[in-house]
Amino acid sequence: MTVLATLINRNALESRAGGTAFRRGEAYFSTGAVGQLRAQENKVSAKVEGTQSYRVELRGEDGELAADCTCPRSGDGYCCKHCVAVGLAWLDEHGSTSLPTDGAGRKPAKAKRRDPWQDIRQYLESQPSESLVELLLDVAQRDDRLFQSLLLKAERTHDGGNADKAFRRAIDDAVRIRGFIEWREVGTYAGNIDQVVDSLAELLQADSAAMLVGLAEHAIEKVEHAMEQVDDSNGEIGGIVCRLGEMHLKACTLAKPDPVALAERLFSFASTLPFGLCSFDAATYRTPLGKKGLQRYRELAEAEWRKIKPRTDDKGYDPHRASITRIMERLAEASGDVDELVAIKAKDLSSSYRYLGIAEILAKAKRHDEALVWAERGLQAFPDRPHNDLRDFLVAVYLTRKRNDEALQLTWVQFEERPGLEPYRKLREVAGKLGIWPVQRERALVWLDQAITREAASTSRWKPTPSTPNYSLRLSIALWEEDLDAAWAVAHQGICDRTLLIALAGKLEKERADDAISLYRRVIPAIVDETKNSAYEQGVRLVRKIGSLMAAQNRLRAFADYLAELRLQFKPKRNFIKLLDDVVRSMTLAK
């Protein structure tokens, strides 16, 4: 049985969403608004067509059903009608695992659901062509996407028609923007563009590939500039641009346009488009460019590269410089010329990370002495907190060359500059290789305790009085080292991040249930006080953990008393109380 099978049922969906949202979700499901389900062991996702396309995901999370949707209601923390619709679709596809039995103890067979598309196909196949034409025209009058698709198909076959002009007009109409498009509205906008791209894909044939080359370039340029006014956080528009890029490359290979003119256009796109989502570099287009095209591309790149001045100071991001640099790097990588690539990289030494890039190139080419020189130059050029990746590179080299003291010192500097679990783990790795970890561990923990005390005692304009020591980092180290006794002691020394406290409680459940319960009870009030539904759900999940632990100890009466305390303490928080009532009901059913 999958995780979802234990969590998704009609009662659970109605309990999470509420009666109104559940009924609306039923209506969405019954009208076929749910697209194809994508199910895994622990989650199921699908698109739901409403006023626009919404993406829904249901998943198991800490033994509970979690639901996410891109609609505004879900964004406010509620289980929405779209989530209900997907849950019902999943149930319909997988069937119930708790069907009632008949008198003989047998479960009734699940009724086979009719395929509506098959019914529609059979109906259409029985109609005369004239009726189908009228039906399609009627629908096209109400569906802009269908109208556009049919129009483009008609332009391609109409004698004297101008398909190129029609496609360009369709691209412009689909891409046009009136004001900024937020991420919740991107689905509809992307769908309009995607429909035109579907029509463009039909041109990928020998007799129309040449036209597709120009149309794809027009579309890529238009969409990339439009993206400056779109929140494409989900990557839908970017995915369409990449699809156009793949289509353009195939069309160029098929149509074999003039290689010199193609090289000029490719270089222009590579150096001017705002996002550069498609690969317009020479290596990608090696086949359609040929020898002449590749030569022309390099000529253009080198002419522009000569205008770029060496840079040692970080004066902010220069998009033109970045584009030309990327082009030159790809040309050098394609030729395999390490010295050329190093020379290109060396034109910008504005940070220690730039030196690291050169050192890594040389190390990969097995020119290790030169790599070390460049890395140490970077450390000297930026003595005030150089990039930690550069330090890590040098630590690895120093260990290889038995320069152990320098390796340990660089690792310690990272830990002292920014104490954290990752620097501590680095220190453990390096000191372990040198066989001195016990001594270095004690040194690190003493230093950390002193740093925590200093930080708590310090005052400033923004912190006028001393604060309670925060032992979160010390707790994270104890958890990583699986030292539960130390973790328990640290958890009671001062402030600790509640995520770490919850993690500690989880590790204590099996052997030290009372300690786990006390930690859960400690964090629940702060979670509920956040006053949002996601926090309420997390709080109730922890309450259920407490219930399970206390039930195993035959302390259900004490758990009931605890629930009563929570109801009294958080009485004004109605949504939390509603979730708490579900816990009470489940207790009653369990008796």
Image: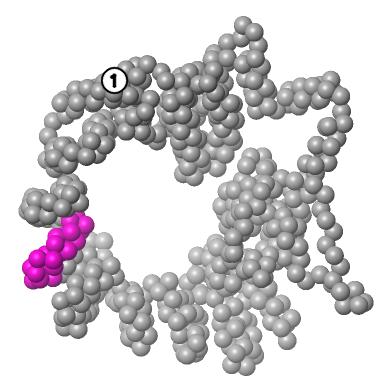
- Residue 49 rendering spot, x and y as whole percentages: 67, 43
From the image, which quarter does the C terminus lie in? bottom right
Q: Residue furthest bottom?
A: 554
Whether residue 170 sits left or right of residue 406 in the image: it is: right
Does residue 492 belong to the magenta stretch?
no
In this rendering, the answer to whether 31 lies above or below 154 is below
Q: Which region shows up in magenta?
A: 387-410
In which image quadrant can residue 62 be found? Answer: bottom right
In this rendering, the answer to whether 249 lies above or below 528 is above
In which image quadrant can residue 170 be found? Answer: top right
Whether residue 285 sits left or right of residue 188 in the image: it is: left
- Callout 1 amino acid: Lys
- Residue 303 rendering spot, x and y as whole percentages: 19, 22
Does residue 404 belong to the magenta stretch?
yes
Write down the residue under mark 1. Answer: 292
SS label for mark 1: helix
Secondary structure mostly taken by the magenta-highlighted segment of the chain: helix
Q: Residue at x 36, y 82 (%)?
A: 482
Q: Residue at x 46, y 29 (%)?
A: 250
Q: Residue at x 38, y 72 (%)?
A: 497
Colouring scheme, one of rainbow, by chain, secondary structure, one colour: one colour
From the image, which quarter does the N terminus lie in? bottom right
- Residue 525 rendering spot, x and y as whole percentages: 50, 74
Q: Nearer the viewer, residue 577 or 304?
A: 304
Q: Is residue 215 visible?
A: no
